[in-house]
Amino acid sequence: MKRRNFLVLVGLLCSLNCGLFAAEQMNYQNYELDMLLHEIKGPTAPIVTDEYIIFTADPNNRFVGIAFDFENYQIVHPFQVLSKTDDEGNVSRKHMFFCLERKHKYESLKYRLVIDGLWVADPLNPNKEYDENVNLYFSKLTDLGQVYINTEIQKDNTVRFIYKGETGQKINLAGNFCNWDPWIYELQETSPGLYELQLPLPKGKYLYSYYIGLTPVLDNTNSNKMYTKDGRIANVIEVN
């Protein structure tokens, strides 16, 4: 029954996404990422860097998508096509790819591909894991290492506050958005020494500091700082 429910779910996702997305060449604003993509000679096993995980596929496929365990396989991300042009101006498909930006701290992940309407394990990744609950194989990446993450503004104007320090601490957040009250917001330790808090904020410029007890502590992942009205140094972040 679990396997049937999983197949129904992925079938619906595939039917929704395969019709909406077509593989095409993407012009990247990130120069380093663009250069990295062009250095890939062809379809290969997943490439892991400090900032990205790059998945590739055979360019002869009509559609390739990828779904991840940390999203409960509920989103199918379409691959793009990287094309190359020779000296005579002829354009050919080099490989298909998907870049996962490593904003999360996952040290391992599982995923499956949709290749021309069929859900499969990644044929280019030999590391697979069998799940007897759904009677399927899932591709897996392990030993990804620690990912550098910092305080950032997410798409929905939610600020993801990050603090890195010793494990077992109580870290609070205060700023001009809460009249500098250090007892309202507390970060949660999501892994040893890594503390996080997601806080929705309207557009504006915000000064903030972390607090250990009543002692203010600067955000060591955000280099933007300015003086407060009373002459202290605080971090600053601007929500646009």
Image: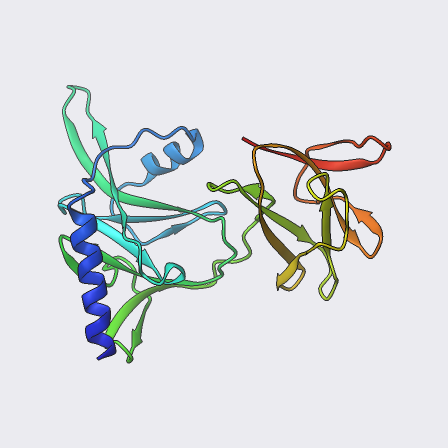
The answer to which quarter of the image holds residue 233 is top right
Residue 183 spot, x, y in % from top left: 76, 55
Q: In this view, does 67 lie to the left or right of 120?
A: right
Quarter where residue 127 is shown: bottom left
The N terminus sits in image quarter: bottom left
Q: Where is residue 140 in the image (x, y as percent from the top left)?
A: 36, 64
User: Which residue is at a point 41% across and 36% down the rendered structure image?
Assistant: 33
Q: Which residue sits at x=24%, y=43%?
A: 96
Q: What residue is at 34 percent from the left and 53 percent from the top?
A: 46
Nearer to me, 74 or 175: 175
| Residue 124 sits above or below residue 127 on the image | above
Left or right? Give the position of 86 relative to 73. Answer: left
Q: Would residue 10 be found to the left or right of residue 236 on screen?
A: left
Residue 120 showing in the rendered view = no
In front: 35, or 104? 104
Q: Is residue 45 above or below residue 101?
A: below
What color scheme is it? rainbow
Q: Is residue 55 visible?
A: yes
On the rendered image, what quadrant is the C terminus found in?
top right
Percent of width and height locating residue 200: 56, 45
